[in-house]
Image (spheres, rainbow, N blue to C red):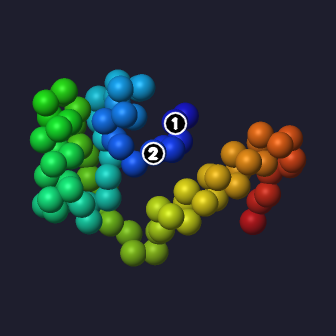
Amino acid sequence: MYIETQPDKMSAWEQLHFTHFFKGDDWRGTQKGLRLEREFAAIGVEVVYFPYTVHTSSTALRRALDLITADADSGAPAVSH
């Protein structure tokens, strides 16, 4: 499992050499999304867009993963809701 720790997607690719990159479709057609597609196409990576979900917050998911990771690192039992 890889948890993104930096916003630079190319650095993540340099570590993992993945073939597909998944992004919410709110990026599709934007300057950032088009740049990402060009940069990844140059190294053979396909950008796959998932439908944007209004009720799913990537920030909230990252915070939850941070808590889980911190608990695992400290040896504390995982928190479940």
Question: Camera-side residue: 80 or 14?
Answer: 14
Percent position (x, y) of residue 56?
Answer: 47, 68
Q: Quadrant of the C terminus?
A: bottom right
Front: mark 1 or 2: 2
State the residue at coordinates (50%, 64%).
59
Where disc 2 sits, the SS reads loop
Could you say where residue 40 lies in the image, as x and y percent from the top left? 20, 36
Say few, some or many: other residues with alpha carbon within 10 Å of mark 2 (under 14 / 14 to 19 / 20 or more): few
- In the rendered image, the quadrant that contains the N terminus is top right
Mark 1 Cα-neighbour bin, 10 Å: few <14, some 14–19, many ≥20: few
Q: Which disc number belongs to residue 6?
A: 2
Is 56 left or right of 41, judged from the image as shown?
right
Q: Where does residue 42 sit, x and y in percent of width and height?
A: 13, 30
Which residue is at a point 45% across and 45% down the rendered structure image?
6
Q: Farthest bottom residue?
A: 54
Mark-to-mark CA distance, 1 and 2: 11 Å
Tell me the residue at 36%/43% (across/down). Answer: 8
Instruction: Indicate which disc residue 2 carries.
Output: 1
